[in-house]
Image (cartoon, rainbow, N blue to C red):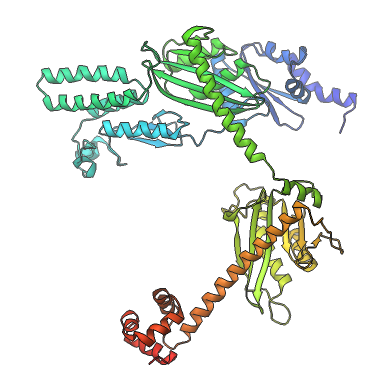
Amino acid sequence: MNQTPEENTQHKAPLEEKLKNLPSGPGVYQFRDSLGGLLYVGKAKVLKNRVRQYFQSRPSTPMLNAMISKISDLEIITTDNEVEALILEQNLIKSLKPRYNINLKDDKSYPYIVITNEPFPRVFPTRRKRNDGSKYFGPYTDVKTMRFALKAVRDIFMIRSCSFHLTDENTAQKKYKLCLDYHIHKCEGPCEGLVSRHDYNDMIGEVAKLLNGKTTTLINELTEKMNEYSEKMLFEKAARTRDKISAIEVYSSKQKLIDAEETDRDIIAFDRVKGDCCGMILKVRDGKVAGKTHYFMTNAEEKSDGEIIERLITDHYSKTDFVPEQFYLMNEPEDPDTLKLWLESKKGGRVEFVVPKIGDKYKLVFLVKKNARLLLDELILTKMKREFVPPSVESLGKDLRIGKLPRRIECYDISHIQGTDTVASMVVFFDGKPKKSDYRKFRIKTVLNETGAPDDFLSMREVIYRRFRRFAENETAGSEDQESDGSFSSEPDLVIIDGGKGQLSSAVKVLDDLGLNRIPVIGLAKRLEEVFLPGDSDPYNLPKSSPGLRLLQRVRDEAHRFAVSFHRDLRNKRTLTTELTEVEGIGEKTAKKLLIEFGSVENLKEVLKNNYNIVERSAGKKIAEKLKEAFGAD
């Protein structure tokens, strides 16, 4: 609803008061709309100057103009310095996901390698990062890289794989026993105190260097140790250290050398197409490529290069413990001084930003940007495939005038023979193709009409109720924890009832009672391929040449096939089992066993007639005699 100038002035008054009283120190600001929804989170060295810029200058982009027009409220959080503001901004963006900030793809599924915070640490992969003092390496956007690094660690170092709570007291009391890993030389036996905590944690320090890519440094340190052991005539330790060095050299040889300088640096670049963006971080340790990490971002169309680089750096290094000495960047961050202060506080030493324009350094940055573009092209291609809608689906949506594309179609059919073994089928088509993982079967047992015979209309009502009851309950309660059955937790774009007006009315009544009357429902009669719409007494005939009608027929035929096959299976099972269980002394369990053994009742009869001894050995003399008597075998 449009506001009058007077109403708009009253609405903006509180915001104008806040703008007049903005503090001059650093902090974080949040813009909200008239409903309290969060629009944008930003940081500033001087809040007064930064926030007022939005309202004093003309917006430079359409997106910024749209955001400013929606701002109705402002929240301020002051901090002691710019670094605190940077950290707070990062945490708020990650937790609140404001509409106009750059959004990084949720990376909760990316794995880490963790070194636990214990007297005798363990090393294993995890997808959950805890603030428990443990060291985390990653995140690994390429799981193969993580597995390769973890396998190298386990092959080179004798790390315990058990989850025992090892303390000095427990090991002194011999509370735990040695396992197989000790005997095959995969563990040094800390559970029985066969290795000191000091020596074990020295080894864990070597593991951390390997995971950080510091292989050259590690090899140099181990070489010094090996020489010391040799001088002290500790030849067994020297030999083990020599073998460790050889294994690390093999691991290191698989890393590509790109720089003669043994400097730790990360090369960061990105590329974008409209609002989609991919940023990549190439990790170089001791002059060799130690791995790479990439992030997909959305809402980046009108963001500056500096803002994207800054968001990429803050997000990645807030999750990793290792910070290199040098950064090769595609362009300078929006606030390089604050970002550098934050990284130096994490590292405990100096860091350097380099934005190369020419030469070998620029070629490295360009190479990373090129790799980011390749990943971005893959993402765009995947999105295009996902968003492609077949012509038959578009045609059906237009023919039925249901207001949206019927991408997910569910069809229901009832099947029985003379009222016995009534069943129902639910088939699902997504984008014109069967989605068999979402198919469901229903056994109808309780629905009878006044004469005591199964009723198709009541059966359809029961099936629709069972399908949508839990969905409606979760929707009413506002719960996201829907039924674990993925098919039942999805809302269809179109429901097809295999039948005429009677079956359609039954389904519509149930959906109305459940408050789901927004879901489009149609009936499809078999005889003349007539389409029935709720509330219309006359059929709605689609053109015979319509791709939408052909799609309806395919869905209906699949539902019928699925229902009939289920009905046939039940009938055959009941018939076969009943013929055997009618024999006195044979229960259902024995009947099933005989069917599995001989394949069918006819085969069993044939074996009884010609090879009675086989049945006697398989079923026992008593059962064989009963079968012989029942089936009249000689």
Query: Can residue 620 be spotted in the picture?
Result: yes
Q: Is residue 24 left or right of residue 214?
A: right
Query: Can residue 179 be spotted in the picture?
Result: no
In this rendering, the count of numbered labels is 0
Q: Is residue 520 above or below residue 623?
A: above
Q: Is residue 523 left or right of residue 236?
A: right
Closer-to-camera residue (441/199) = 441
The percent position of residue 219, horizontal first and vertical second, equals: 27, 20
Query: Quarter holding the C terminus?
Result: bottom left
Furthest-top residue in this view: 358
The percent position of residue 21, horizontal first and vertical second, equals: 72, 14
Q: Quadrant of residue 193?
A: top left
The percent position of residue 148, horizontal first and vertical second, equals: 37, 33
Q: Is residue 237 left or right of residue 283?
A: left
The percent position of residue 1, horizontal first and vertical second, equals: 86, 34
Closer-to-camera residue (100/263) = 263
Q: Is residue 569 above or below residue 331?
A: below
Give me the residue at 69% from left, 45% from top.
Answer: 390
Closer-to-camera residue (450/294) = 294
Q: Quadrant of residue 265?
A: top left
